[in-house]
Amino acid sequence: MSRPKVDVIITNDNLGLRAPSEDGYSVVLVAAPVAPTVGYGVAKLVTTLAEIKTEFAAVGNEPVIEAFEKGFFAEAPEGTNVVFLAMAPATNLETLLAASNAEKALNLAAGDACLLAAIKFPSVGYTPTVTDGFDQDVHNAVVDAQTLAAAWNAKNKGFRYFIQGYGYTNAAAAKDYKEEAYRNGGIVVGSVADKTATATLLALGREARIQIQENMGKVKSGSLNIDPADSVKIGATEADQVSDTDLNLLHTKRYITFEKNQIASGYVWSDDNTLTAVTDDYNNFRHGRIIDKAQRIAFREYYEELKDDVEVDENGRLSIVSEKALETKIESAIDDDMRANLSKRKDGSADVTCLINPPLETHAALYAKNNITPNFNIIQSETIYLFLFLKPKGSLKYINVYVGLTATSI
């Protein structure tokens, strides 16, 4: 043994820094004051703020750079893939989200985009047509965004979207979305340094940064990275001055907005609501993002099985060995890629269940719910019926603490 001494060892991985995640791949559609270097209507992939500053270096585009700097890259780590597509300042949100425009960016992302946001910077003198508490363009954009999301979901390349809450007036006037079915996205209500576009990209950046099962308003994720010198408002009112009544009303109507962090300085997001009923399985971003990822994995795993020749039993049904192999294939793939995102079984594996050709006598309701009249003779039908169920993690959204005194042991 050597003589006594002091060794000072340099350690690493203590700052909790996050590497870019493929689940954070984002698309930003923007009506910009001046054309970027690449030009209007041309999609481009960037991964750093420096690239954004280069692309939007023209005088007049300072608000665009600010939205990315104080919004997206204030939360998302450098290196996160983001495809932008800019159009002229007169372009409204609805037009940005038209398939003929948005799909240029989505196609460049090659189906890997998991998140999308639409923002605009209208020219001076623009007067919003206020309907249901916002510029009517906001509500129109939701319809187009959902149509676009549904089309890409049909391609097994689903994504979730944020719409800039432009022209917000007040909570009472805001449209109530709790009976709607725009389950893929949300409207961001609020501004940073008086820019609603910055707030929208801040939401996109936080969602790109966190794990897909996390609520974007999770307090343990920390306050939003907002410069203390920048005002944070909901409409014309400082965010921490907005009444609980209005905050609750916005939440009930399914909007996403700021709320004061009660145990630290700064703000957190109110919740991760989507624009649909609370009874919808996908009434929040985290469930939607989980199902989007699972859908991609399921397609990837089973596409290579397409048109394969398989063994059948005496009734023409897929053999038990083949069924088990197909069940194990997807359960293993989900466990490998999504264990951290799902609830776990007692053995620590992801809680995922795959049923292939479940018996009609015990699963009639499952088939009926999906409008299926099964024919298990694969020689006749050339079809198998596969049901995949994942158990998400919960979210502690309501914590009731009862505090009192006691004179005896409890």
Image (cartoon, rainbow, N blue to C red):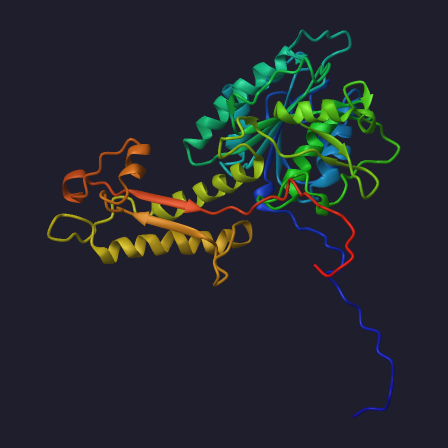
Quadrant holding the N terminus: bottom right
| Residue 198 percent location from the top left of the image | 74, 28
Q: Examine the image and state in which quarter residue 82 appears.
A: top right
Q: Is residue 333 left or right of residue 260?
A: left
Residue at 80%, 68% (x, y): give it.
10
Res 334 seen here: yes
Q: Relative to 167, does residue 242 appear above or below in the rendering? A: below
Front residue of 91 and 190 = 190
Front residue of 28 and 241 = 241
Q: Relative to 263, does residue 14 appear above or below in the rendering? A: below
| Residue 275 percent location from the top left of the image | 56, 25
Residue at the bottom extreme, as displayed: 1
Q: Is residue 147 left or right of residue 307?
A: right
Q: Examine the image and state in which quarter residue 233 appears.
A: top right
| Residue 132 percent location from the top left of the image | 64, 11
Quadrant holding the C terminus: bottom right
Residue at the left extreme, as displayed: 314
Res 303 seen here: no
Q: Is residue 267 left or right of residue 334?
A: right
Front residue of 292 and 132 = 132
| Residue 180 percent location from the top left of the image | 52, 21
Residue at 73%, 16% (x, y): give it.
170
Q: How many marks?
A: 0
